[in-house]
Amino acid sequence: MRAMNRNLILNIIRSQGPLSRTQLTELSGLSVGAVSQIVNELLTTGWVYEVGESDYTGGRRQVMLRLNPTAGYVVGLKLMENRVVGAICDLETTVLNYVEHPLTGVHTPDAIAETLAQIVIQALYDTGITREKVRGVGIGLAGVINGETGIVHYSPFFHWQHIPLADRVSRYLGLPVYLDNDVNTLTITEQLFGSGRDVANFAVMTIGRGVGLGVVINHAIYRGHKGGVGELGHVTVVPDGPLCDCGKRGCLEALAADPAIFRTVQGKLALGAPPTLEAIAQAAEQGNKTAHEALARSGYYLGLGLAIVVNLFCPDLIIISGEGVSAGAHRLNPMLNTLRQHTFNGLLDGVEILVKATDDRAWARGAASLVVGKLFESPLVSSQSSVSTQ
């Protein structure tokens, strides 16, 4: 109970601070004595600090408290098929050092785990942060990832199955390591620090090399069995359609992700090798019919996918993110038109839709947010997770 109360106070300060002790008592529902004792402990251990007095409104001025972002540091890594991007962050996920590293040689789980550990060690050294100050390492990658156990059940890039990657990296580093689907890590960033901060139910759809989905229900990431929620890109939208990287046909990803656009324009546009999404969008803007139709076709199928999300979850907010949003209106307008056409009557009313471009730095920061989320997770949730994985 004491740990839960400490976590409650710390989370209130993190999400709503700076706050006075009186405000903490009102918001937490705990007694004055309990709040005072917990705050003194947090001050002593360096998790919070005092930032001056509140504005004078009559009576005694109160000292304000806020989270100390340098009470520890977190590391985020996004693992891709041919490279790794990473970030050293404080507890507010301010990026202190950003790194990129190509993946060469063999891609066995042990080789990748060792490479990830070396990237972390070098990045910490370059940032001047000792390992003792690091609260944990977060890793995001595509696939079916069990965030509770740190196991990669299926990786489409490396074709791994049932690999305890978090444990392997942790053994090299001697630090806590957390693993999740990369879209979930981006969703956690939106939940802790972004547009989803005060939203009970929202979804994040990412467009790029693939099509992914993160879902928050009642303020909690919804992962489903073994972390399998969010494989929107592998919903079949055209039976017997084009072959997908997963081995099946007609997946949304095979029809709407960035590689599908590149395949459509291949040999038809002189855009250099390899073509870029920005170049295709520019060609569409200049009136090129092939470029416009390729982007519009992708947008149409993305809209079908989004309609499925709304019909299933009916979120308050949908965030469209990923590198693929850089294609602009020629892709996004058909997507939104199709969404409106195929959503069940009335379900889209009042749903806010935000489009937010994402770069590699944001993905790395997302993986760091995974650690922050674990740090501020209720001890009750943590204990339930540990029991469920035994």
Image: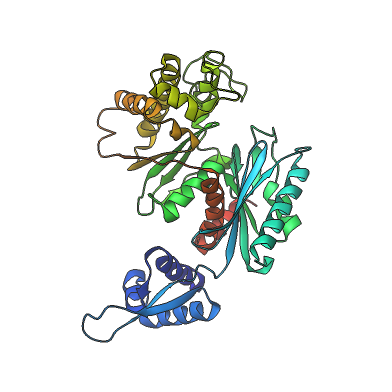
Looking at the image, which residue is at 43% across and 50% down? Answer: 190
Measuring from the top left, give residue 105's x and y in whole percent.
78, 38
Pinpoint residue 173: horizontal percent, then vertical percent.
72, 58
The image shows residue 271, relative to residue 316, as above or below, that is above
Residue 181, how many percent across, how many down? Answer: 56, 42
Furthest residue in direction left, as rendered: 58
Could you say which is closer to the camera, residue 75 or residue 323? 323
Q: Is residue 65 left or right of residue 268?
A: left
Q: In the displayed image of the protein, which residue is found farthest to the bottom?
A: 60
Q: Say which of 220 and 143 sits in front.
A: 143
Q: How many marks?
A: 0
Q: Nearer the viewer, residue 235 or 94?
A: 94
- Name which quarter of the figure residue 171 lies in: bottom right
Relative height, residue 203 to residue 367 (above, below): above
Q: Is residue 300 visible?
A: no
Q: Is residue 269 above or below residue 99?
A: above
Asked where in the image residue 202 lies, by quadrant, the reply is: top left
Residue 285 visible in this rendered orientation of the protein: yes
Q: Eyeballing the image, is 158 above or below 255?
A: below
Q: Report whether 27 appears left or right of 178.
A: left
The image quarter containing residue 71 is bottom right
Scheme of colours in the image: rainbow
